[in-house]
Amino acid sequence: MNKTLLIIISALFLLAGQSVFADKIDKEIADARKKTGEVVTCSPLGKVPGTLTIEEAAKKIRSGMVLRLLPGKYNPIDNVVFEQDRLIIEGNNSGGYVDLPLYLYGKDCIVRSINIRNVEADSGVIVDTLANTITITSGTKRDSAIIANCAVNRLMIYDNSQDVIVRNTSVVNGVQVKDEGKVIQLRTYTTHTVSVYNIIEFGKMDKKGKITFEKCMFFSDGHLFGGDEASMKLITLTLNDNLIWCARSLYRMPKGKTEVKNVDGLKDYFGLGKEIKNVLAKPPLKLVPNEDYGWDRRPGIFIITSGPGSKKEYGCNMSESAGIPVPLKD
Amino acid sequence: MSDEHKHMPEGEHEHPAHYEHMELPAYDDYLKAQKITVKDIKDHLTGPIVSVIVHIIILCTLPSIVFMEHPKQIDSIEVQVENMEIKQMDKIPEPPKPPDEVLDDLEVEIDRPDVDTQVNVTVDSAASVSTTDVDINVDIPDLTSIKPNNSALKLPKIYAARATSGGRISAIKKYGSGTDAKKIEDAIEKALNWLANNQNEDGSWGVYETSKYSFTAMATLAFLAHGDTPASQKYGQVIVKALKKMLEWVDKKCNPYITSGWYSYDHSLIAYTIAEAYGITKMPKLKDAMEKTIRFIIENQNKRGTFYYGYDRTPVIQSYDRDPISGKLLKGRDPEPPSNLAFSGWNFQALKSAFSAGCELPGLQETIDKAILGIKYHENPNTKEGGFSETPRGKPDFGMTGVGILCLGLLGAGDSKEAKKAMTWMQKYNANGMKTCAWRYNADVHKEYQKAFTHALYTWYYQTQVIFQDSKGKGGTWNRWNRAFSNAYLQEQNSDGSWLTPAEKYGSHLDPNKTNAEWHYVKEYSDVKDLKIYATTQNCLTLEVYYRYLPTYRLSKSSEKKKSIVDEEEDLGLKIE
């Protein structure tokens, strides 16, 4: 009797521990949304009165400050890399497109509420963000990054010694805007009728890393994951309750290998963590267009309108009116 | 236009096999990575240790739970019930509408503009073209020393040959290698009539919104190249309407540049045309528009001196620029900006045209100097061979080599070793294509260059300018090509004065991907009328080569080998002023 009681209590405790861990991530996300600091505002060429150019801002800004990017085409002649720690990058709440590839090489930075071409960050939190590509680089001591409630066309993760958590994020590729907001499949204009690319790519590694995807929505007309096969074994990949659809394989397998059609098949390539149910289905999508698209940025992002995921349980909470993902109200 | 969509620069994550070139970790490194580290111990033992501690705490508190007093049992419960008014719902909510699903193919409905078909311009070749010899000096002026023209009273000398029908006929006779000058001028007149008759009421050309900007600019260029101006009796109103429309676009759509879509050439073509029109007319409104459009081009040149679609110039950090483990930019790396020679070419021509028209914007001359380096940036990596490619370090092709040579010439570097090597490369690899204007599939030509069929008119436009300028309208290479292209163009012209592209006219037997030719690689643009506008403007400009001299920009500070130029021109019987 006592033994049974102890087992029950232990189980309850373990579940409680997991919940504490989840709360910690939620708290980091909530903090990232409300953290404040001295604000530096930027506009293309600094043409808006009272604003700086992106190059001037890179020189002026200090760790812990907020960089507010007004929409527009920045087009710097050289890449602007921010080395400062704990920066907070945000849009101006209009959802307007910030045409700028953003490079954050400092640690513990926050990117929030912005529609931007690309984000590249080392560690910290990226939340409520619409981008073509989000790249997580590795190399700082903290070695952890959170991507939450974001919509992207592609994720690139250098997972060396990293602990990366991707939550409620939509990774969608394979469709293109046509006139009047209608869509067709991507790359039908070229010799490829479908993309062969994967939408989540991992960099080369020499140390172990952990990646967890929770409540995400993946939609690819090619493959899902890809990367250097030898390095992938160093990744502990956990897939918890995601909605997954890809036309080809869950892993862009080497030549001669068969396509991976279910999550279990990924164990041939990754160190798999404990999985909770994942839904493999094709969701109906609705376009939220990004009109200023180009070769380096995809034409838009999609939200699920019905079927699996329509009750906001998968992917980001994309707002059509705001033009970017917004926090889901309780 | 080019098939750039097939040559999109690789985004840092888009190369299908970029990691195939990455080194695999050594086996020892792999084993090392598999060893248990302090981090692993932390990861694996933190949970159990915490669990044990908490279990101890819980076990200690268990007795208090077991021996705790039970709450007193309640014998009776008093329940109070109140009547509540239940309201009817005003309206039962309707079920949500079905979603717009993503379909493989969706039909697109596009509003077509009203086309003014009421006003017909008839060909009156007898009236418009004099077949008698007129004593007009149609010698090619010294194109390497054109000075900016700031006079509103004097038509620049480079426009003299095209200003009258007599001048045009004389020029064709002089450089036409015995071809029938009247027939060529008639063909151009018929084409211009067709364009005039197919101008939209608002002054633009084109059926689709995405084609209007470029087509309006190109069609206007065709009229200007013919010597027509807003003052011309026959086409003056056509040009006025077109210029008004373009001025409206510059005013309302130039934010910060004019574009109808990502792969559009709209801004550069409109800037080019307005600069050309300003050079001829000196209308102040055109000057303002020229400065606005040219200023944007100057401000958005990339660090290599070229341009890319959407005027994107921020360098792209490719996988080979990154540390393979951290993913960060390697120290000392200088990532390259995206660059496209087809797109750059029209911008270069716009810059040159603005300079020739007397544009005095700050930075214009520096931009032109840098542009020369930009063209060289697209030279074949095999520099022994030469030639130019659409993207840097790419495989050269005939169309892009034509763009490179012509633009080097226009920008004052026609005598550079890169231009000369490229010309030699063209003559070596395109020997058949420089003497045969193959509208139908021709194995001898097309085995050398697939795009000679699908991008024929674009390639021939540049090829014609390049050979003409290189040979100054004389010699075997020019004579062979001139006879070939002029005869073919006359033969293939439709009776209404328009043309169709070779791939659309004769390419139905080929793979649809390969016949998706010229500018209209987007399926919904396969409108016959739009195709005709494109082909007719492009062919007009090609046929006008005899009298549409493209002046060369050259800075006075540049080292100019006057003597060699004098010698060469004396040989050709041309006068140096």
Image: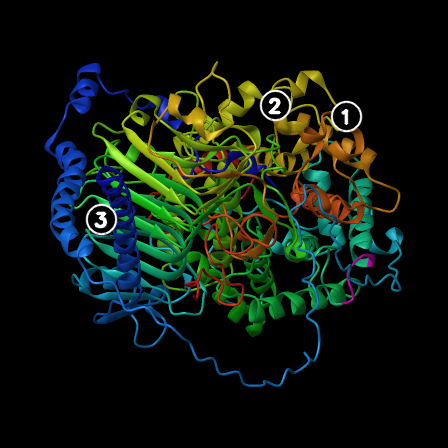
Task: Report helix, strand or loop for mark 3.
Answer: loop
Give the labeled residue for mark 3.
A105
Residue type at tag 1: Arg
Q: Chain of mark 3?
A: A
Amino acid identity at mark 3 = Tyr
Residue identified by numbered label 1? B440
User: Is B572 left or right of A4, judged from the image as shown?
Assistant: right
Magenta region: B197-201
State whether residue B335 is above or below residue B151.
above
Q: Say what secondary structure mark 2 lies in.
A: loop
* In magenta segment, residue B200: yes
- Could you say which quadrant of the image residue B384 lies in? top left
Kindly identify which residue carries mark 2: B449
Q: Nearer the viewer, residue A52 or B431?
A: A52
Between disc 1 and disc 2, whose residue precedes?
1
Label of residue B408 in the image: none
Q: Is residue B68 left or right of residue A321?
A: left
Height in image: B113 above or below B400? Answer: below
